[in-house]
């Protein structure tokens, strides 16, 4: 069974371009599945061709009996279905036993959305400080809210990704996919220009460093560093609920929906692979703010 699992994981890396973290998650979930098949009381299953739909249903029942959360079970079922879809496409199984396997329903929680007033207070918070870091912080907060970028997308930005003449920025999303996002907020553009002119030159240690946003040591800003910056300003702005980079992404999307943005266009801006992921903002529009 391991040889088929190895081929599947290699395909995810070489053809699908999945990240190391995603591939590790698949490996962990599918290793658990393989171990379940080996430990079956009715006898071990060593070849995927010998798997039946009833065996997969037993695996689903076993996970539910162990008290796994519905989201965890759904993720593990999705991994198994992807694995057998690969095996079927490659001709290693005559038919896909996972075809009728149903995942548990997951009740989607409405994402935490900042009100317009909370956004204004958060973005204004760096103005109460001074120096290069305050200008940097204003620029990164403005950019997050103006584009809806993910935290990893923002901290991996390089100078060459920014096109101020066209008021746009190129970011690298999930699975290495690039997308160009317009910066339609004039305040965000002004903050970026001030950061580049008055802040970044005072932070940078190595002139050839391409990173757009730098920390106080002159190195590329990290995910954790960005989280701490946002938390500090949220506290300073008197926002009681937890605020993360993703909170600004959710707020960006929700507020655009409220302004009448087309859902397919919003899908492109957010870099969602499926429109169903984007539609949650339409569903929550009347329950927030």
Image: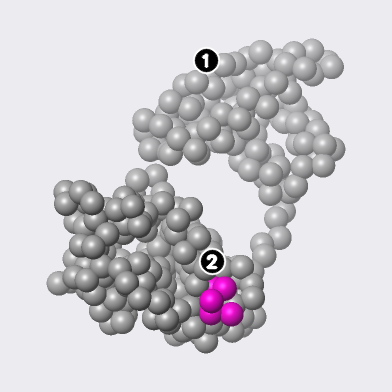
Which percent across, then down, holds residue 143? 35, 70
Residue 9 placement, left or right of 105: left
From the image, tell me which residue sits under label 1. 3
Helix, strand or loop: magenta stretch = helix
Dot 2 lies on which element?
A: helix
Residue 43 is situated, as x and y percent measured from the top left of the image, at 79, 12
The magenta-colored residue range is 234-238
Label 2 CA crowd tier, 10 Å (few <14, some 14–19, many 20+) = some
In the rendered view, tell whether residue 103 sits above or below residue 63: below
> Quick one: quadrant of the N terminus?
top right
- Residue at 52%, 15% (x, y): give it: 3
In percent of the image, x 49 and y 83: which residue is there?
121
The residue that appears at 42% across and 81% down in the rendered structure is 128
Q: Is residue 237 magenta?
A: yes
Question: Does residue 235 lie above or below 118 as drawn?
Answer: above
Image x and y of residue 272, in percent: 44, 58
Q: Residues within 10 Å of mark 1 (few under 14, many from 20)?
A: few
The foreground one among 205 and 185 is: 205
Q: Earlier in the sequence, mark 1 or mark 2?
A: 1
**Residue 62 at x, y percent in the picture:** 80, 33
In the depicted structure, whether residue 41 falls above or below residue 182: above
- For label 1, the SS is helix
Asked if residue 271 is positioned above or below residue 19 in the image, the reply reads below
Q: Is residue 141 visible?
A: yes
Q: Of the numbered discs in the image, which one, if any, rests on residue 231?
A: 2
Q: Viewed as shown, does residue 186 lie left or right of 98?
A: left
- Which image quadrant for residue 161? bottom left
């Amino acid at each position: 069974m391991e040889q088929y699992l190895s081929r599947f994981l290699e395909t995810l890396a070489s053809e699908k371009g999945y990240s190391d973290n995603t591939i590790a998650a698949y490996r962990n979930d599918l290793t658990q599945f393989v171990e379940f098949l080996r430990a079956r009381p009715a006898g071990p299953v060593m070849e995927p061709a010998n798997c039946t739909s009833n065996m997969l249903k037993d695996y689903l029942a076993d996970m539910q009996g162990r008290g796994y959360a519905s989201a965890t079970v759904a993720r593990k079922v999705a991994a198994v279905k992807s694995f057998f879809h690969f095996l079927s496409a490659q001709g290693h199984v005559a038919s896909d036993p996972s075809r009728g396997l149903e995942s548990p329903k997951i009740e989607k929680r409405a994402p935490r959305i900042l009100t317009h007033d909370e956004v204004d207070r958060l973005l204004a918070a760096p103005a109460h400080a001074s120096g290069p870091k305050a200008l940097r912080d204003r620029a990164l907060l403005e950019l997050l809210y103006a584009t809806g970028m993910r935290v990893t997308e923002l901290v991996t930005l390089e100078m060459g990704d920014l096109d101020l003449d066209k008021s746009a920025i190129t970011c690298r999303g999930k699975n290495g996919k690039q997308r160009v996002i317009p910066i339609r907020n004039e305040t965000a553009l002004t903050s970026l220009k001030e950061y580049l002119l008055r802040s970044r030159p005072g932070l940078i240690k190595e002139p050839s460093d391409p990173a757009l946003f730098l920390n106080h040591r002159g190195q590329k800003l990290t995910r954790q560093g960005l989280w701490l910056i946002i938390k500090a300003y949220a506290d300073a702005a008197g926002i009681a609920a937890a605020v993360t980079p993703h909170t600004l992404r959710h707020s960006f999307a929700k507020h655009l929906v409220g302004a009448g943005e087309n859902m397919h266009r919003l899908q492109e801006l957010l870099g969602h692979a499926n429109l169903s992921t984007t539609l949650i903002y339409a569903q929550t529009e009347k329950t927030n703010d």
